[in-house]
Image (cartoon, coloured by chain):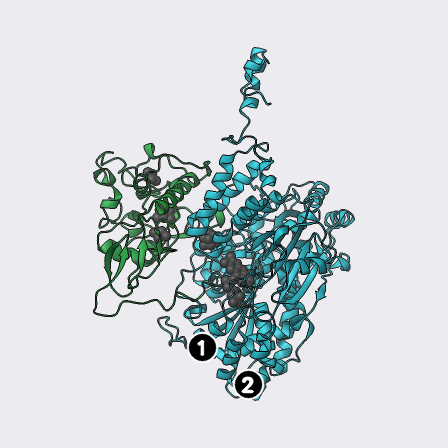
Amino acid sequence: MLDHFPAADLIQVNLCADLNVKLETAYGSSFRFWRSRARLFEGYPTNLSEPPHRDCHVKSESEVVAMSIESAAFERVLSRHGRDPHALVQILRETQALMGWLPRSLLSAMARELKLTLAHVEGVAGFYRFFHTRPMGRLRVLFSDNITDRMLGSEALMADLCARLGIKPGQVSADGRVSVDQTSCTGLCDQGPALLVNHHHVITRLDAPRVAQLAELIRAEVPVPQWPADWFAIDHNIRRADVLLGMPLAPGAAIAAALARGAQAMLDDMKRSNLRGRGGAGFAAGLKWELCRNATGSIPGTAPGSTHYVVCNADEGEPGTFKDRVLLARHADEVFEGMTVAALVIGARQGLLYLRGEYRYLLEHLQAVLQRRRDQNLLGSAILGRAGFDFDIAIHVGAGAYVCGEESALIESLEGKRGTPRIRPPFPVEQGYLGQPTIVNNVETFCAASHIAAQGGAWWAGIGTHQSTGTKIHSVSGDCERPGLYEYPFGTRIDQILEDCGARDTQAVQVGGPSGVCLSAFEFDRRIAFEDVPSAGAFMVFDCTRDMFEVARNFAHFFAHESCGFCTPCRVGTALVVKRLDKLANATGGGRGSRHDLDVLFELDLLLHGTTHCGLGASACNPLRDTIIKFRPAYERRLESLHFEPGFDLDAELSIARRMTGRDDPAAHLEISP
Amino acid sequence: MSDVHDMDDMRAAPGSPATFSLDGQDVEFQAGETLIEAATRAGRYIPHLCWHPDFHPHGSCRLCTVKVNGRAGAACTMQAAAGQEVQSDTAELNAQRKTLLQMLFVEGNHFCPSCEKSGNCLLQATAYQMGMEGPHFEQFYPNRPVDASHPDLLLDFNRCILCELCVRASRDVDGKSVFAIGGHGIHTHLLVNSDSGRLGDADMALGDRAASICPVGVILPKRRGFAIPIGQRRFDQAPVSQQTQGDGDSP
Ligand SMILES: Cc1cc2nc3c(=O)[nH]c(=O)nc-3n(C[C@H](O)[C@H](O)[C@H](O)COP(=O)(O)O)c2cc1C
Ligand code: SF4
Ligand code: SF4
Ligand code: FES
Ligand code: FES
């Protein structure tokens, strides 16, 4: 192992041993560790303007030093995962938590150890937004950049922090101490503006005094655990509770009920409940479980269907959605219980929970709940004494990639690859994780399943509407007095939710996040239901003072940032949309736009709808189309003329010529404004 | 909602020649064939860039998007099924294809007149076929350095359309996995597997399948250049739509 670190023997051995002890006790979080390591990175080149690839990387002395210091800890990460190439994303994550970033020489060592090619490892590392293949600040600050954070002033706060630290967003400070940048919605919209520290801790409710104090703490290199504890407080903000949030189940109750019924009867009850998936697509959960139960996987070299998997989708990447965060924090038992009931039905022995990287701070809590459940015989072998009913759950932590919420991309990521959606069919129920039949369900779906197991499918079907049974949790944020979670039976009117959350002068509501639908005031009598307004759980409120163009532009940037880059229409199309909207928005073109720009945007919307490989690209233009149609004045204000207008001001370009010729008469101007 | 509903499609019954209709004409297919495989065997052209008959379908360029019973799908990944009504050569779909081609052109740096691949380039030929006359969109002008480190091969990343044919050829035929994909979104790019990240240090030879598979002008043999003069090249002879059997490698 050590022979991969040529300079190992050059290092002060004491420092090395000392660090490894600390690493062991404070994996990933200790600031002391950062400090003791800090010197080693000084002087490392931090040129961010280099092209991000193919730079022939000569190992600097400090890199070699840093690497050898980490070698023992790195070895522990590798052996913890049994050198399994399928664990590559976890190995990258845990190694980066030790190092702060992932030097090429380390990727190279990882490739050798896992028997992968370096290019493969590099390609996976380069896919996830939270992995860094060039040096970052010893402290990494990421401001959540959802529109709701912006509405609460996040942009000015980030500018303030950067000014105080003397850096620009996206840059590392000259002393290597800190880097500040933005990240997609961190799921704290009801208590924003929020930021993420070292991809691990979150700070909520940022304001000017907090930012001023934060700058001081960063400058003084005060360890994160010594920062004011109330900064890290995360509230659940449960405003309206129904079945899922208000009727907690005793651990084991649902499993016992399911066992008493038997697997087939439990499946029948799931189908009777008519529960539809809560992750967005709304596929019938019972039918999915049945397809998986009946499927025999067909991966060469393994017995067909020898193993089935239960996967819980806790990627919750849709901006404005934070219900799964609260369910995991407050109702983890019901989520794991639902997964266990599913395991009984489909015959799975292994479950996996895919936790989004932004929710890393929930990991210890979730592990503790899992351990308690093992101790209670609710996981492990012979669950509740039933011989042969063996099931356990492992947690996989993501690394900042919204597309990994798409179920087949999620499975790729679980297998240690880039999160590129698969060609379907085959669907995961036929060939999912490691080619085996797999169900992927949302956190809330599993939570609901545990209640259905406990109280019966008919009871659940009696709540909500005929086509949309049960309750739905809404993550309410934006312009309202009481942001937080609101659980209602399906069929609830939009204006009811608006009234309950204390929204006034509401101009628009974005239901289901950017991929969902933007409703304007004349639609507030519509109802949340699969047959009317479906929702994956976000409910962002915009009052009359908000510029809906800026809302759409923020969402466009989100999709371009999160496109996996696999298919042409989404990879290039989302970038083109951003270019157009930025042109319209002053950012590059002085607020100059024309009808032609709107035509191009409509054309891109149509194209993405009809040609992309996955749902991300297909819905990437939804907010654009909705807002152009429903809030057209917000766009027209930005149109200079109804004809083509270039991205630059032609007349202004002529000013040099005018100065040189000393002319300023009307004939020396291209066009006289009316 | 689309999670599972394609699963009960009608596969061809063994023995009996099953057909689907492509733009109104019947096409026979064999069990397990995709739409584009069956169409190509029948001498019918469905525009494509990332598909190649010798390799697993990839589904990334989306040029082959057709409508099957009114729903859009990629002909290179969709299984043929009896009775499907497939539309491909329609004004709407060809307009979409033209836009996709324009996207690929502005995403990279394509100066066809000075490109060695001109006339043999599938991107260029398909653009002619779809009647593309200009870029339509603003150019991205990415900064992508050329890799000339290999003694026999040149890599000009400026023209890469990320079809991953080289990735598949090197992995599945050559058994070398010289290429991989890195980055994400608009910054997605091709990676070379070597310590330096350069082709000269990679396990790649002129005779590898991956060396001749690139449909555009990225992976080029050195010192061959303009051996066949422009005007006498593959797509100078006949448009791409008349060469459906000719999806061979680079001449
Ligand atoms: C781009 C994209 C992102 C998605 N993100 C999530 C997510 O964060 N959480 C989730 O549960 N489902 C997400 N989905 C939906 C999943 O693909 C899948 O349908 C869902 O997890 C199935 O669970 P359900 O049936 O319980 O809803 C996403 C889909 C797409 C296309
Ligand atoms: S639509 Fe295409 S590029 Fe976009 S995320 Fe899906 S597969 Fe990736
Ligand atoms: S180099 Fe050529 S073959 Fe490889 S991905 Fe790029 S365009 Fe395709
Ligand atoms: S040829 Fe079908 S997507 Fe490229
Ligand atoms: S002419 Fe197509 S890449 Fe050169």
Distance between mark 1 and mark 2 Cα atoms: 16 Å
Q: Position of residue B106 (x, y in %)?
A: 42, 39
Q: Which chain is cyan?
A: A
Identify the residue at image location x=53%, y=80%: A269
The picture quadrant where one finds residue A592 is top right
Residue B34, given in percent of the width and then of the height, sits at 30, 59
Which type of secondary structure does the marked residue at label 1 adopt?
A: helix
| Same chain for the residues under marks 1 and 2 in the image | yes
Q: Quadrant of residue A45?
A: top right
Question: Could you tell me the amino acid type at mark 2?
Answer: Leu
Q: Position of residue A168 (x, y in %)?
A: 64, 41
Image quarter where ligand 5 lies:
top left
Q: Chain of mark 1?
A: A
Q: Which chain is green?
A: B
Label 1 CB-ligand 1 distance < 8 A? no
Say above or below: A460 vs B148. Answer: below
- Note whether A392 is above or below A577 in the view shown: below
Residue A544 higher or lower than A441, as above or below: above
The residue depicted at 62 percent of the width and 62 percent of the height is: A360
Please rate how many residues cluster around mark 1, counting C-alpha atoms within 10 Å: few if below 14, some from 14 to 19, many from 20: many
Q: Earlier in the sequence, mark 1 or mark 2?
A: 2
What amino acid is at disc 1?
Answer: Arg
State which chain disc 2 sits on: A
Task: Identify the secondary structure beneath mark 2.
Answer: helix
Residue topped by disc 1:
A293
A642 relative to A115, above or below: above
Toward the top, the furthest residue is: A662
Residues A52 and A561: in front is A561
Residue on which disc 2 sits: A259
Q: Which mark is residue A318?
A: none
